[in-house]
Amino acid sequence: MTQPVQQAFNPYTENGGTILAIAGADFSVIAGDTRQSEGYSIQTRYAPKVFRLTDKATLAVNGFAADGNMFVKKVRQRLEWYRHAHAKDMPIRAIARLIQTMLYARRFFPYYVYNILGGIEEDGTGAVYSFDPVGSYEREACRAAGAAQSLVQPFLDNQIYFKNQTPAPGTSFPKHLPLFTVLPLVIDSFTSATERHIEVGDGLEIYVVLAKNSDSLQGLQAIGGIQEVTANTDGERTFVIRRDLKKD
Amino acid sequence: MFRNTYDSDNTVFSPQGRLHQVEYALEAVKQGSAAVGLRSKTHSVLLALKRSTGELASYQQKMFRIDDHVGIAIAGLTSDARVLSNFMRQQAMSSKMIFNRPIPVNRLVSAIADKAQVNTQEYGRRPYGVGFLVIGQDNGGPHLYEFSPSGNSYEYYAMSIGARSQSAKTYLEKHYESFADCSLEDLVRHGLHALRETLQQDKELNINNTSIGIVGPKSENETKEVPGGAFRILENSSIEPFLKTMVAKESADAPAPAAPAAPATGDEDVQMSG
Amino acid sequence: MDHFPTNWGRPRNDAFDAYGTYPIHQRPQNGPKDAFSAGVQRTQQPIVTGTSVIAIKYKDGIMMAADNLASYGSLARFKDVQRLHPVGDNTVIGAGGDMSDFQYIQTLLNELDIEEYTAQDGHSLGPAEIHEYLSQVMYARRSKINPLWNSLLVGGVKNGTRFLAYVDLLGTTYSASTLATGYGAHIAQPLLRTAVEGFEDVLTEEQALKIIENSMKVLFYRDARSLNKYQVATITKDGVNISESKHLETSWSFAEGIRGYGAQTQ
C-alpha cells in the first residue's frame, strides 16, 4: 500500500553572494557584495551582508539571508547585554567563541549561514575568524565564503599565502601584506567573481578596521568615496568603501 | 514595631483609605541619596550624589544605562533597582527585536509603573523600595519621568528624588522656567546647584561623589563623540569641567539652605503623619 | 499503562462501548504524540491562493496593486477578494499565497493596530516597524516548520520617508524601489525596473499608475491564475488610499490568426 506523498516544507533557501576577509598586521578588511538572489531572480541589488558589531569587530554573513539577518540581530543583543554588564565592548576573540556557542546551540536545526568575523585583537593585531554553519571555527589570515568561494579562495591562497609561488633567490615572502596591497586584491576578487558567477554582483562593501594609531591610516583618506563609521578617532577606527559591481 | 493594625499587609487598606506598606516604600526612596533630573528643548540630564560607606569603600552606583536612548538614576534599594533596570533593558531590547524601534520612553516608564502597581495589590508581595528618574529621547524629543514604588509615573520639566530632595526641588521650582532654552552646560550647572542643596552642611560635590547622565548632543565639556546624542554616564575626571562651572553658593542666587529635612539616619522607624 | 479500555485488545463488550463507536481496526491513538503526529495540522501547501502583488516607489510615495482573485487550484474560486490591507495611517500590505493565512495575518495586524492606537501617546507604527514585526512573525513560524504561506509586500510613507519591502514564508526580507511577488517577480519586475529605477523621485502619480496598469495587464495576459479586476493602493504623506476595483481593457483579437489561441479552423 502506498502512502500519500507530501512535499515537506523546506525551511531553507540559498540567497547567493560572496564574502571575504583578510587580516593584516594591524588592520582587518571584511567585504561582501550586495546582491541578494534566489534561483535566477535578483531579489534586490542592495542587501548588506557585512555588519559592524563593535568598534573593533565586523561580521560578514552569507548563506540563507533570513537566518543571517536573525543571527546578526541575536549576536548584537548578546553584545548589548555584555555592554550592560561590563560597560565595555566584548573583545573579538570572545565574540568568536560566542558565535561558535550560538551556532552550535542550533546544531540540529542550523542557521544556514557561513560567518566571517574580522577586526582587531586585544593585542592590536588584525584578526579573521571563519565559521561553518554549526560553529566550527578557527583564526586565519584570510578566508572567502559563499557562492564564489571556490573562485575567490584559490586566488587568495595564491596572493596572500603565496601558495604555488617561490620567492626570488635570497628573498622571502612577507608575513603580512600592507593595506594598499590588500584593498586592490579584494576589489579584484569581487570583479572577477562578478564576471564568472551569476549570483555575485551589483555592489561591493568593504569594511576596513584599523588598530589604534595604525600606520595604515596614511593614504586611506585618499581613497574615493571612503566613509568613516566610528565616531571617535582615538581608538580602533572603522571605514567603509563602496564600489559598484556589474549588474548583469 | 507595628505603627498600627493596618500596616503588615500591603493589600489591606487602613480606615483612612491608605496603604501603609506603600507609604513605607516611599520612605525607602527618601533614605537613598539624592538624584536630580532636568530637561531642556534639546537635552535631558540626570545628576546624582553617590554615597560611600567609608574611606576604604567604593561609591555606590546611582545610574544605569537602559538603551542608547534611555538612562535612569535611582534612589532607594539598589538591589530592587537592578531588578527593575534589567526588566527595562529587556523591554527596550524586545522593542528593537520585534519592531526595530527604540522603545518610546513613556511606554518604558508605564511598563515598570504597572509592575510596581501589582506589588501594591497582590497578596504576599512587597512594593519596590526604589524610585527612578528616567531620562530619554524619542521622536517626541527629550523626556524626564519620575517613577515611584506606588506605581505612579509622571513627566517633569525638572525633578528630584531621595534624601533632602525637597531642597533641590525648591531650587528647581525657582529656576525651571529658564531650563527649556538652556544650553547643556547651563542645564548641568543648574542640576549641580540643585544637587548641592541636598548635601549636608560640611560636604560638597566632587568628582568622586557625583554622577552625570546625559541624553542629547555632545557638550563642549565632553571629550568623546556621542553619535545620535546617545545616553552616557559621566563620572570621575570627565565631570571635572562641569563641576568647574559651578558658582559658589554665596554668590549663586540659590535659596538659603532649607531647614534640614527629616534625619536620614534610618535607624528609627518612620513617623507617619495623620 | 493505557487506561483506555478499547485499547486493551479483548473481545468487544457492549458494556462500555455499546454502540461500537470505535471499529476494532481504527481505535483512537491515545499514546504520546510526537512531531510526526497526525493530530497537528500544518500548512504544507497553500489551498486558496492569491497570485502576484506588485509595488513601486514614485515621487509622492508608494503605489501597490493586486488583483481580486483567490484561486482554488486552477479554479477561479473567489473573484471579489481584496488582497491589499491597510495598517495604521501610513502602511499597506499586499499578499500573495494562501488567503486563509493572510486573513490570520490581518487579524494579527488589526490587534497590533488597536493596541498601538489605544496607547494614545503620540507614537505610531510606521511601515518599517510593521515590516519588521511581520518578518519576525514569518521567521518564527518557518522556524516551527509551520509557515504562514504568503509572500507579502509592505509599503508606506512616514515622516517623509518612503518604505517598500518584501517578506515571505521563509522570513526572507529585502527592499528595493520596485518589488513583485509570485509570477510578478518574473513577468512584471523587469518592466517595473526599466520604468522606475532612476526615476523614483520624478515619477508623478499618473505616470506611476500607467506603469502599474501596464504591468497588471501583462500579468493578466500571461498569468493563468490572474484576473482582469484589481485594486491599486497609494500611500503618500496624506495617508492611505485603496481604490475601488478596476477592470483591465484587454484585446484578444490578435489571437484570431494564431494557431493555439482561438478556435482552430483546421
Image (cartoon, helix red, strand yellow):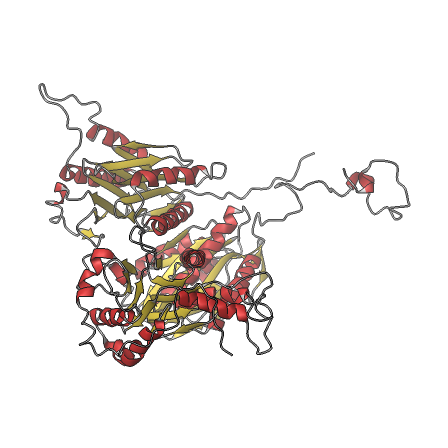
Seen from this angle, which residue lies furthest top?
A169
**Which of the two residues, C160 or B128, is positioned nearer the viewer here?**
B128
Q: Quadrant of residue B125?
A: bottom right
x and y percentages locating residue C12 in the rendered image:
88, 40
Q: Is residue A246 left or right of residue B131?
A: left
- Name which residue lies at 32% across and 35% down: A130
**Which of the two residues, B114 or B42, is positioned nearer the viewer here?**
B114
**Which of the two residues, C153 or B216, is positioned nearer the viewer here?**
B216
x and y percentages locating residue A131 in the rendered image:
36, 35
Q: Is residue A168 above or below residue C24?
A: above
Seen from this angle, which residue lies furthest left?
A170
Q: Quadrant of residue B12?
A: bottom right
**Residue B253 in view:** yes
- Name which residue lies at 76% across and 37% down: C1
x and y percentages locating residue B245 in the rendered image:
17, 68
Q: Is residue C82 left or right of residue A60?
A: right
**Which of the two residues, B243 or C194, is positioned nearer the viewer here?**
B243
Q: Is residue C16 above or below residue B83?
A: above
x and y percentages locating residue A91 in the rendered image:
30, 42
Q: Is residue A119 left or right of residue A100?
A: left
**Residue A112 in view:** no
How many numbered marks does the figure carry?
0
Q: Is residue C32 left or right of residue C171?
A: right
